[in-house]
């Protein structure tokens, strides 16, 4: 059996060897949002293909590199793109980068994604704080033998999405006059988009958003006691909401349109999160 802890530790040491920065906050930038890492100061960029044991992203719009740099005075480690189970990766492989974050000393993660809007009150381009999730991907990254070096066998998920972090995000969004909604994210396997009947089912069980990522990463992060803030960009309305077909081009176009707003919000949130993490 492969020692995931040792692999994650080796990957972490490889990344940190190339920079003097020691960030405590990690960012995972989803479809259309990776450009937020292009403006990091004092940046070191490491392609996933060069990091030992690191999975390689094949999804459109995912650059596939780790960027360590600063947002103002705050050092961060930013993933420009992630991997998904629909690419053929296991849940454990999908969350290996989160394990690497933990071994790098990251104590808080900001996860972003492109999502389909189920709540009819949402509009294309809306930013939505995730307050909870529904895992419909059929598996968990914690399936199998537990490694106690990562975390406990049965981690609590009652407060998977940190309340204090969400309050900070709401306050900073209000100060910037950025509308910031809040909702429940449902994760499905993909890669096909959902049918209108599936979207109606998701609505009835309490989902406001739907996507193909994030949830496994949240589970792995909480397993390692990293705190989580997650923000979705509603890049399209889900199937059956509007009378039009869905396309990934629409996802990318919307991400491009909102990236400056999204980056402004991140720049406002990060110093306050860094203060909290530094006091942990």
Image (cartoon, helix red, strand yellow):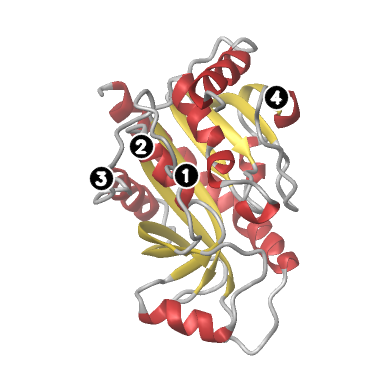
Distance from label 1 to label 2 (Cα)?
Answer: 10 Å
The first of marks 3 and 1 along the sequence is 1
As drawn, the label of residue 46 is 4
In this picture, residue 117 sits left or right of residue 36: left
User: How many numbered circles are shown?
Assistant: 4
Which residue in the structure is indicated by mark 3?
A: 156
The x, y position of residue 196, in whole percent, is 56, 85
Above or below residue 123? Residue 149 is: above
- Marks 4 and 2: which is nearer the front? 2
Horizontal and vertical percent for residue 211? Answer: 54, 63
Question: Mark 2 and mark 3: span between their CA atoms?
Answer: 8 Å
* SS under mark 2: helix
Residue bearing mark 2:
223
Residue at 68% x, 76% y: name it.
Answer: 246
> In front: mark 3 or mark 1?
1
Task: Say which of marks 1 and 4 sits in front.
Answer: 1
Do the residues bearing badges 1 and 4 touch, measured as CB atoms within 8 Å? no
Q: Are marks 1 and 2 in contact (CB under 8 Å)?
A: yes
Specify the quadrant of the image occupied by residue 131.
bottom left
Q: Please tell me whether residue 260 is drawn above or below residue 52 in the rendered image.
A: below
User: What residue is drawn where x is 53% and y is 64%?
Assistant: 188
Q: Nearer the viewer, residue 184 or 277?
A: 184
Between discs 1 and 2, the one toward the N terminus: 1
Secondary structure of the residue carrying tag 3 is loop
Distance (Cα) linking label 3 and label 4: 33 Å
Q: Mark 3, residues whose alpha carbon is within 10 Å: few (<14), some, or many (≥20)? A: few
- Dot 4, how many residues are within 10 Å of its Cα: few (below 14), some (14-19), or many (20+)? some
- Dot 2: few (<14), some (14–19), or many (≥20) neighbours within 10 Å? many
Where in the figure is residue 15, as x and y percent of width and height?
Answer: 61, 18
The numbered disc on residue 141 is: 1
Say whether residue 276 is left or right of residue 21. Answer: left
Give the label, 3 or 4, closer to the camera.
3
């Amino acid at each position: 059996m492969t020692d995931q802890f040792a692999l994650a530790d080796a990957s972490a040491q490889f990344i940190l060897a190339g920079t003097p920065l020691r960030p405590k906050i990690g960012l995972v930038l989803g479809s259309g949002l990776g450009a937020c890492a292009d403006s990091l100061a004092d940046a070191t960029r490491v392609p996933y293909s060069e990091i030992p044991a690191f999975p390689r992203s094949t999804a459109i719009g995912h650059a596939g590199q780790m960027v360590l740099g600063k947002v103002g005075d705050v050092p961060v480690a930013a993933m420009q793109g992630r991997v998904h189970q629909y690419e053929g990766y296991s849940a454990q492989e999908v969350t290996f980068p989160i394990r690497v974050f933990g071994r790098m000393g990251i104590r808080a993660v900001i996860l972003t994604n492109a999502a389909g809007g189920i709540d009819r009150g949402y509009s294309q381009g809306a930013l939505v704080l995730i307050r909870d999730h529904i895992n419909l991907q059929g598996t968990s990254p914690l399936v199998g033998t537990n490694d106690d070096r990562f975390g406990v066998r049965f981690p609590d998920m009652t407060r998977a999405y940190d309340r204090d972090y969400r309050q900070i995000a709401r306050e900073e969004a209000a100060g910037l006059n950025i509308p910031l909604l809040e909702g429940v994210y449902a994760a499905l396997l993909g890669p096909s988009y959902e049918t209108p009947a599936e979207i109606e089912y998701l609505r009835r069980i309490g989902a406001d958003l739907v996507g193909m990522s994030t949830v496994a990463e949240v589970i792995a992060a909480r397993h390692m006691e990293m705190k989580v803030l997650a923000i979705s960009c509603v890049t399209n309305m889900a199937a059956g909401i509007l009378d039009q077909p869905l396309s990934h081009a629409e996802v990318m176009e919307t991400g491009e349109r909102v990236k400056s707003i999204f980056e402004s919000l991140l720049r406002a949130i990060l110093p306050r999160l860094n203060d909290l993490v530094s006091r942990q």
